[in-house]
């Protein structure tokens, strides 16, 4: 090899020189969940839930819950009467009790637990009131609308001893459970970093939802809907597109990043706030009057269970469609997580070819170096190094049903849920820190003593 040799040449030579081969295999993750098998549940063993908020997410939560064995809906609450009709349609019961006042559900002795799928600015009040009424609650993500809300919710969970399940359902997926197992058994070696990405490129994806055509102050309690936020005149767009404004929603961070964060923290086995966060972004595409960024990139620093600090890099973009996924990177390989499969590809972490730096040696020295390198590193075929790529396939990791099932089982058994208020608080704090850093244009950290985000 006397010509100038580039790095690319070395890489293409490497497999034959060092004898590395790639072995691939695919494994189907096929959990047979109890909830999917037909069964009769004794009336005394059934769980009766009440649902607060039957909007875009609540309608699916209600329908999914009713498909689980032994789970019944006792009543539904919404401030918009059209969703009373919708709830009765989902329950296939024209007599399902419906109300605008969620307190009616909390006072109802027939209701064991509550599902709350209301906009973020209502989460805290409804969760604290539900727990104080002695009921368990499944609350949608992001758990909190502000760090202070999260602190109050954790305190209420602790004080009442009731169950809180936060609705970032990724943590109930068999795919992420497998990913967690791989990370914890050391398949990745020393953890180096994690990256997550999610992008959309359409008005729906950017939350420009069509308000219900008949919405009016007559069939909606607009005053209550606004909660403690400074009141504005009736506005159907705010009702449907509340995510665009920080007064009601938590931006891309609370809407989408929280799913990635919850999944990443679950896989890493981390249950604490980031050590710090630095975010950048802007309103680059959807200049529709929103005050939350549509491109939002954040670098977090987390302490791992390995005793090291790693970067978790999250890239959210409502202006370009990008499939949601993660990459967990370590000294022994890389774990790619997509929506319906995870692939672990091992890396040798060793030179697979002579150094490309030797291209800078005079010929005689170079030739001698190559000869010696090959004598020391080339392997007989039977001992050749193998790079393994293992793919685990499964159902989509957007696992609402298993997540609800986990909640209902805990309501019965009083065993801990997979995503309690402490975990929900920590995942939400990452999102609040991403927002704070974006608005402050500086790195931020969570001050546990002051219970506040500081820069
Ligand atoms: N886990 C997921 O994948 C996922 C997906 C979508 C939404 N979400 C979350 O679900 C929650 C709801 O989102 P959405 O898109 O369904 O919102 P939405 O606006 O479509 O529905 C919310 C409903 O709550 C009702 N509501 C508001 N305040 C109320 C109150 N005080 N009492 C009774 N009803 C009240 C509204 O009238 C509305 O019908 C949000 O926290 C959101 O982040 C989670």
Image (cartoon, helix red, strand yellow):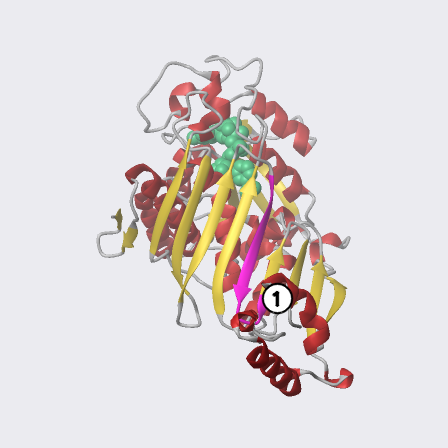
Residue found at the very far left of the displayed protein:
450
**For the point 55% across and 30% down, which residue is it?**
55
Q: Is residue 317 above or below residue 186?
A: above
User: Can I make out residue 40 in this image?
Assistant: no
Can residue 437 be seen in this snapshot?
Answer: yes
Which residue is tagged 1? 5
Q: Does residue 331 show up magenta in the picture?
A: yes
The residue at 54%/71% (across/down) is: 184
Examine the image and state in which quarter residue 447 appears: bottom left
Depth check: give the residue in front, 365 or 285.
Answer: 365
Q: Is residue 353 magenta?
A: no
Q: Position of residue 73 (x, y in %)?
A: 61, 39
Quarter residue 22 falls in: bottom right
Q: Is residue 435 above or below residue 397?
A: above
**Side of 381 where 246 appears, left or right:** left
On the picture, is 427 further left or further right than 413?
left
The number of numbered discs placed on residues in the rendered structure image is 1
Residue 216 in the image: x percent, y percent? 49, 13
Q: Which residues are magenta?
A: 322-333
On the image, the x and y values in percent for residue 349 come to 57, 74
Q: Look at 33% across and 52% down and name the residue there.
A: 155
Query: Where in the figure is residue 11, as x and y percent of width and height?
Result: 64, 66
Which image quadrant for residue 25?
Answer: bottom right
User: Is the CB atom of the residue marked by disc 1 within 8 angstroms of ligand 1's nearest atom?
Assistant: no
Left/right of residue 378 with respect to residue 279 in the rendered view: right
Q: Residues within 10 Å of mark 1 (few under 14, many from 20)?
A: some
Quick check: 232 above or below 149? above
Residue depicted at 51% across the width and 24% down the height: 240
Q: State whether the magenta stretch is mostly helix, strand or loop.
A: strand
Q: Secondary structure at mark 1?
A: loop
């Amino acid at each position: 090899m006397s010509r100038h040799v580039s790095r690319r040449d070395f890489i293409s030579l490497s497999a034959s020189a060092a004898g590395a081969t790639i072995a691939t295999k695919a494994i189907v993750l096929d959990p047979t969940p109890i909830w999917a098998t037909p069964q009769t549940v004794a009336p005394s063993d059934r769980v009766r839930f009440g649902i607060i908020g039957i909007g875009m997410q609540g309608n699916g939560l209600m329908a999914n819950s009713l498909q689980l064995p032994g789970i019944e809906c006792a009543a539904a609450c919404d401030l918009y009467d059209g969703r009373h009709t919708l709830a009765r349609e989902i329950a296939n019961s024209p007599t399902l009790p419906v109300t605008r006042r969620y307190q009616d559900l909390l006072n109802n002795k027939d209701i064991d637990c509550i599902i709350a799928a209301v906009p973020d600015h209502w989460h805290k009040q409804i969760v604290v009131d539900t727990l104080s009424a002695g009921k368990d609650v499944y609350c949608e993500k992001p758990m909190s609308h502000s760090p202070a809300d999260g602190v109050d919710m954790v305190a209420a969970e602790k004080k009442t001893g009731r169950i809180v399940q936060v609705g970032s359902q990724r943590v109930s997926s068999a795919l992420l459970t497998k990913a967690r197992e791989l990370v914890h058994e050391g398949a990745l070696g020393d953890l180096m970093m994690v990256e997550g990405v999610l992008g959309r490129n359409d008005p729906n994806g950017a939350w420009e939802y069509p308000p219900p055509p008949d919405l009016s102050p007559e069939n909606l309690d607009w005053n209550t809907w606004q909660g403690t936020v400074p009141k504005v005149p009736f506005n159907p767009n705010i009702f449907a597109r509340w995510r665009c404004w920080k007064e009601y929603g938590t931006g891309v961070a609370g809407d989408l990043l929280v799913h990635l964060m919850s999944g990443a923290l679950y896989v890493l086995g981390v249950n604490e706030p980031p050590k710090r966060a630095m975010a950048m972004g802007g309103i680059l595409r959807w200049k529709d009057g929103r005050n939350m960024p549509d491109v939002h990139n954040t670098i977090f620093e987390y302490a791992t269970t390995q005793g090291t600090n790693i970067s978790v890099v999250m890239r959210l973009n409502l202006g370009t469609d990008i499939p949601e996924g993660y990459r967990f990177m370590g000294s022994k390989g890389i774990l790619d997580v997509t929506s319906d499969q995870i692939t672990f590809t091992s890396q040798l972490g060793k030179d697979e070819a002579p150094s490309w730096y030797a291209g800078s040696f005079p010929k005689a020295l170079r030739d001698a170096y190559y000869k010696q390198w090959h004598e020391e590193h080339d392997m007989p075929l039977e001992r050749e190094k193998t790079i393994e790529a293992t793919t685990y396939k499964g159902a989509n990791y957007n696992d609402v049903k298993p997540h609800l099932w986990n909640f209902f089982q805990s309501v019965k058994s009083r065993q801990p849920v997979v995503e309690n208020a402490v975990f929900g608080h920590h995942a939400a704090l990452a999102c609040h820190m991403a927002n704070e850093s974006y608005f402050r244009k500086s790195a931020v950290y969570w001050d546990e003593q002051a219970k506040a985000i500081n820069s």
